[in-house]
Image (cartoon, coloured by chain):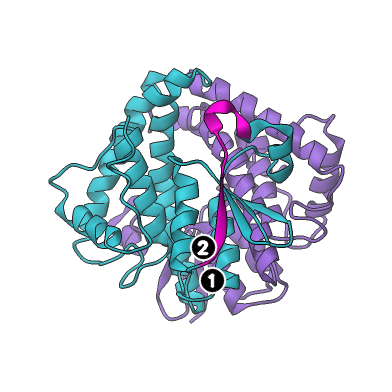
Chain colours: A cyan, B purple
Amino acid sequence: MNMKLYNYGTAPNPRKVRIFLAEKAADYELVEVNMLKGEHKTPEFLEKNPSGKVPVLELDDGRYLSESIAICRYLEAVYPEPNLFGRDAFELGFIEMRNRQMETELWSQIGQSWIHGPVVAKMGIYKQIPEAKEVSDVNVNKYYERLDKEFADIEYVAGDRFTVADITLVTGIDFASTLVGLKPDDSLKNLWRWHALVLSRDSVDDITSTTSL
Amino acid sequence: MNMKLYNYGTAPNPRKVRIFLAEKAADYELVEVNMLKGEHKTPEFLEKNPSGKVPVLELDDGRYLSESIAICRYLEAVYPEPNLFGRDAFELGFIEMRNRQMETELWSQIGQSWIHGPVVAKMGIYKQIPEAKEVSDVNVNKYYERLDKEFADIEYVAGDRFTVADITLVTGIDFASTLVGLKPDDSLKNLWRWHALVLSRDSVDDITSTTSL
């Protein structure tokens, strides 16, 4: 039996794992979970992931893993090449640090703008606070400016090679650009230089033409 | 030269690393950064961590790492025993999954209640939204109930042994209990059974008598 990835087309976290799997040239089957129809909250799905979220990886022995970066960590151990999490102690720490900065400093704010934004409003599943979105929108754009300055000196998020931290950043920015209304300003040339570099990889699909608000 | 950990006494993220270092019986020097005096935002400190946050680990060769779990990941590679992140591919994925659930499902909500709560109000550094705190307070208490159910069947967060996921949970709950006003209800016996088990370790200090709102 093949590995199965439980996926939802436009969600950024499953895309993170799909890019990771493509980098590893791993064989797997994609299973679509229609979140709009609530398929991630059925008793059957909650057995796979009690938190009711995608992605979920079903291993070839039938066990399950969830949380996108935890799935990637498992895949890194099973398919060590190309290395995406670091080879020695310092690199393991440094790449994790950069990955977490993308999560805690950027994704967290994109997430706030998402849950308090127009798409989630239409779903009517969440008590929205417009004031919260104003704050996080400002934070996201400030962080884009910080990244643009950083990319004047570094080629990739964690230095001179492509790592999981680039996957986290590109999925975050593309989600923000297409579904949250927070596309980085055209003037951020270094950030867009990095974006084009990452999009040039075979593993990274361009979602801008297929996904929009 | 010894490793140095840049620390702030009552903050939960540095405590996470202090517990991890104690588990590893690692030698290091503690350097206090007075956040109330803004010492984490000085040009000198921003060279160590451009994000202006503690903890920061200064390695014995003078390099720096920040983000608590990234520091722990580095330490795990340097001091492999006792193992706290997993030994094989599945365990590496599973422990990361559980650790991230504690972060994304509990810490994130405790964080919302903190930034919109009374201590941060006194600091006057953040535009607070009382409505946001009402939502996150509810989420934190719901998650305590979920954890209590889970601890009916498992001894530790990631199963049958102590891991980094327990360190993340205990530092989150103790922070919530002492400084955010979100102590788990006494009726959650399984959760408190787990808490007592973790507090019985030499590495885990009891902060309830020294820290309060």
Q: Say whether marks 2 and 1 touch (CB < 8 Å).
A: yes
* Total numbered badges shown on the rendered structure: 2
Closer-to-camera residue (A173/A19): A19
The crowding category of the residue bearing disc 2, from other C-alpha atoms within 10 Å (few below 14, some 14 to 19, many at least 20), is: many
Q: Amino acid at mark 2?
A: Ala
Q: Quadrant of residue A57?
A: bottom right
Q: Which chain does the numbered disc 1 sit on?
A: B
The crowding category of the residue bearing disc 1, from other C-alpha atoms within 10 Å (few below 14, some 14 to 19, many at least 20), is: many
Closer-to-camera residue (A206/B193): A206
The stretch of residues the image draws in magenta is A26-39
Q: Quadrant of the C terminus of chain B?
A: top right
Q: Quadrant of residue A99?
A: bottom left
Q: Residue at x 45, y 53 (%)?
A: A16
What numbered label is drawn on residue B1?
Answer: none
**On the image, numbered disc 2 is attached to which residue?**
B70
Vertical relation: B174 (above or below) A137? below
Vertical relation: A193 (above or below) B89? above
Closer-to-camera residue (A204/B115): A204
Element class at badge 1: helix
**Residue B41: horizontal and vertical position, in percent?**
34, 51
Does the image show residue A139? no
**On the image, numbered disc 1 is attached to which residue?**
B74
Q: Amino acid at mark 1?
A: Tyr
